[in-house]
């Protein structure tokens, strides 16, 4: 993208000035989890028929602690001994059973804005060692139903070379990878104007660190904020940093940064376990999205 140097300049400028400007923090509840609103609209990669929607996946990476992956014969394998468990209630429904069989290895989501640069939520890098101790992994997805035998070729694994920008006010971070990605197209960003309140949206990322999922039919709930808007999307902790994409024009409209609590405890099971939290469409706090135009407006020409 020949516009990227200007994006990079604007992000670095905003990060350096963020603590000096007298900006008021958004009036939102900062939580790193989410919820299912109304009907469950979460789909696996293999359940997506649209080639356009599938194409977004190759530009989206998951943040994984280096301790959870080990290199063997040019492939990285998951170190299951060091992987935690979410202890889902498998008897709840087919969705809970399916998720229980998938490895939750990720922390956050990020997406390419250049061949060598990822954009994510700022709180994903709040700890000083998160850069050096994390891999950024592409193609963590389930290609076929019942196929959870996941490994990663070396070329899909990247390290964080350095953090180019980290803004705690707007909650974004820009990461330079250790090398350029190959055959991966950076996502296009909205550069100006506000998205319409009826825009068709999809959120793509790694809820709870599970393999890549799509939250379809995401709807805008509040669209009046200067830097943030609120949507109903079936997304969880681990989706932080996910791109919110307008399926009409393919542009990234925002970055998911916070939301509702993920789970409810279920003490009626033989052993305490968790069920995914559900809310009616118009209840709970909604999911908070950083407008991508807060980073691009006034710096770039429109598409």
Image: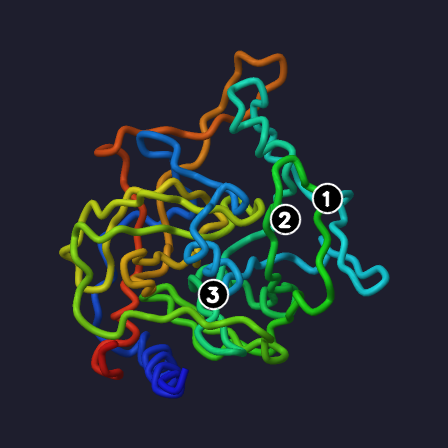
Q: Quadrant of the C terminus?
A: bottom left
Q: Is residue 194 above or below residue 303?
A: above
Q: Which mark is residue 149?
A: 1
* Left or right placement of residue 272 versus residue 152 in this view: left
At horizontal 57% and vertical 34% (from top left) the residue drawn is 99
CA distance for labels 3 and 1: 24 Å
Q: Which residue is mark 2?
A: 105
CA distance for labels 1 and 2: 14 Å
Q: Quadrant of the N terminus?
A: bottom left
**Lower position in the chain sequence, tag 1 or tag 2:** 2
Residue at the limit of the structure toward the right, as seen here: 73
- Tell which tag, 1 or 2, sits nearer the viewer: 1
**Lower position in the chain sequence, tag 3 or tag 2:** 2
User: Could you tell me which secondary element the residue under label 3 belongs to?
Assistant: strand
- Tell which tag, 3 or 1, sits nearer the viewer: 1
User: Could you tell me which secondary element the residue under label 2 belongs to?
Assistant: loop
Tell me where residue 17 appears, x and y as whole percent: 31, 81
At horizontal 45% and vertical 55% (from top left) the residue drawn is 51
**Lower position in the chain sequence, tag 3 or tag 1:** 3
Tell me where residue 59 appears, x and y as whole percent: 50, 65
Q: Which residue is mark 3?
A: 111
At horizontal 24% and vertical 32% (from top left) the residue drawn is 283
Q: Answer with the quarter of the image where residue 171 lies.
A: bottom left
């Amino acid at each position: 993208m020949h516009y990227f140097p200007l994006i990079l300049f604007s992000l670095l400028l905003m990060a350096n000035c963020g603590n000096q400007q007298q900006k008021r923090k958004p009036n939102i509840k900062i939580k790193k989890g989410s919820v299912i609103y109304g009907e469950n609209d979460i789909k696996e990669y293999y359940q997506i028929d649209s080639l356009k929607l599938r194409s977004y996946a190759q530009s989206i990476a998951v943040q994984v602690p280096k301790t959870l992956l080990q290199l063997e014969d040019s492939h990285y394998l998951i170190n299951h001994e060091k992987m935690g468990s979410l202890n889902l209630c498998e008897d709840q429904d087919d969705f809970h059973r399916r998720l229980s069989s998938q490895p939750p290895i990720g922390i956050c989501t990020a997406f390419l804005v250049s061949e060598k640069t990822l954009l994510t939520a700022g709180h994903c890098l709040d700890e000083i060692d998160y850069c050096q101790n994390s891999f950024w992994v592409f193609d963590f997805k389930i290609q076929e139903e019942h196929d959870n035998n996941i490994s990663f070729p070396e070329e899909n694994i990247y390290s964080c070379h350095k953090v180019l920008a980290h803004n705690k006010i707007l909650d974004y971070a820009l990461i330079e990878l250790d090398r350029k990605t190959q055959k991966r197209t950076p996502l296009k960003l909205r550069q100006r104007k506000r998205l319409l309140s009826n825009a068709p949206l999809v959120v793509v990322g790694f809820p709870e660190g599970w393999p890549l999922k799509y939250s379809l039919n995401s709807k805008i709930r509040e669209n009046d904020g200067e830097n943030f808007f609120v949507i109903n999307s079936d997304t969880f902790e681990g989706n932080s940093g996910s791109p919110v994409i307008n399926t009409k024009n393919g542009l990234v409209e925002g970055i998911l940064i916070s939301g509702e609590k993920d789970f409810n405890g279920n003490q009626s099971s033989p052993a305490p376990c968790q069920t995914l939290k559900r809310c009616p469409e118009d209840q709970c706090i909604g999911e908070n999205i950083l407008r991508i135009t807060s980073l691009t407006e006034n710096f770039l020409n429109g598409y």
